[in-house]
Amino acid sequence: MFKVLDDNHEFDTQISFDGKDHLVPSNITVAAAALLIGVKSIRETPVTGAKRMPLCMMGVCYECLMKIDGVGNQRSCQTLVRQGMVIERQIGATEVEAGYYEA
Amino acid sequence: MVGAATAYGLAKQGQKVLVLDGEDLTLSASKANFGLVWVQGKGWDHAPYAQWCQIATNLWPELSDELKATQVDISYQRRGGFDFCINEQEWQERESMMSALWKNTDGMFEYEMLNHSKLKKMIPEISKSVIGASFSPQDGHVDPLALLQALCKAMQNLGVTYMGNCLVEAITPTHGEYVVKGAKGVFTAGKIVLCAGLANGQLGEQLGMNIPVVAERGQVLITERLKPFLKWPTLNVRQTAQGTVQIGDSHEDVGLNDGTTPEVLKQIAQRAVLMFPLLSSVHLVRAWGGLRILTPDGNPIYQQSTSNPGVFSVTCHSGVTLAAAHAGPLCDWILGDSYLPVIEQFSMDRFDV
């Protein structure tokens, strides 16, 4: 559905999205990459489990939360893709591990 | 919140009620509070307040059931609540406070002092820095914004007229009635109940009542939504039904400023992380300040004007906890029916030397 307007972009950055590898241009955001790849939803809400996609693309609405490199609830529209980045859909609320940080 | 609960209670008793509310940005503890339905610590130095909180929290399950008809989920829970101690001094002070509260309620207040190992069994996430806690099975919490919405809906279902954006400018006694001039018009009533929080001072003044109220700021941090990890509310950390964690309990005297400051938010965050180390990896999404409504001794003021009978002032800090009492026994007093004698203990006579 979405395509890159500028033909000069090189698809040189490898990211993993929900376990599948993709090549995307560098210097785009994770949210933009998700749209480019054509995913159907980037998260499921914590309360009702509704499927969501990025909305404002400027860091305000918090609709684009994803799990990036193991850290949940990241605003994917405010995060640039990076070589080897591991991106997962945010399913529900983030889990905090009990006792994990206790010395 | 106080006004909504009282209006709902009056409507339940068949009264014709008009509610005049302020604007969205009017300073209002209803829209900025911690959502605790709480008896721990309330009234340890004033027996009537302790007893009144017992009455309120025991009426709360009934109020919660009644509000189900509004279809608003207020997420009320009464599983008990904790207040942590991080050093021996806090523990000693808490223990004597709890036992004073127990005496003040003739043993109706239920509580337990838990040492670290007992506490850890109930809350495995707690850190070693917390040496113990007081626990009361009578404590609970609620979604305060949903509660306000539910009360507003419930009172309107009973025929109450609600008028928002209608700040009251003047109240004048005329021929045994009162004329209220508000932003949206002029209204007449036989009885007036002032539930305007911090504005009760200036409204009361117009009617010859000197109601001493001061603001105390509390700042709050809100985290991202997390999977449920904390089953019980605590005095400074609670996880809401939607998964966010609300962190707070600061006390500042800064007049009518409801903003936030990095210094205080830092202290709030540090204390929370000290208690729950797992919070150190959690994102914060919001911070806000709210103003508590305090009387000189921290206890509610329920007072009928002597010079203008039929004018009542209802002023308190615990609008959420006391909602069930305001929607019930307090209305008996306003209507002049037979009422609980404890209510008289909250008149302003106590401030006279």
Image (cartoon, coloured by chain):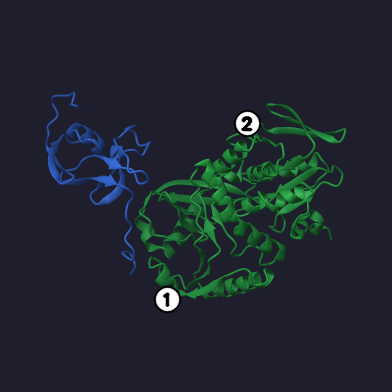
Picture residue at 14% right of the left edge, 29% below the top = A9
Chain letter corresponding to the colour green: B
Q: Chain of mark 1?
A: B
Is B51 located above or below residue A94 in the figure? below
Is residue B316 left or right of B114 when viewed as pictured? Answer: right
Picture residue at 54% right of the left edge, 48% below the top = B144
Percent across and percent down for residue B338 are: 78, 54
Residue nearest the observer in this picture, B231 or B160? B160
Kind of residue sitting beneath label 1? Ser
What residue is pinned by disc 1? B117
Q: Earlier in the sequence, mark 1 or mark 2?
A: 1
Picture residue at 82% right of the left edge, 46% below the top = B305
Quadrant location, the C terminus of chain B: bottom right
What residue is pinned by disc 2? B165
Specify the quadrant of the image occupied by residue B94.
bottom right
Q: Label 1: few (<14), some or many (≥20) within 10 Å?
A: few
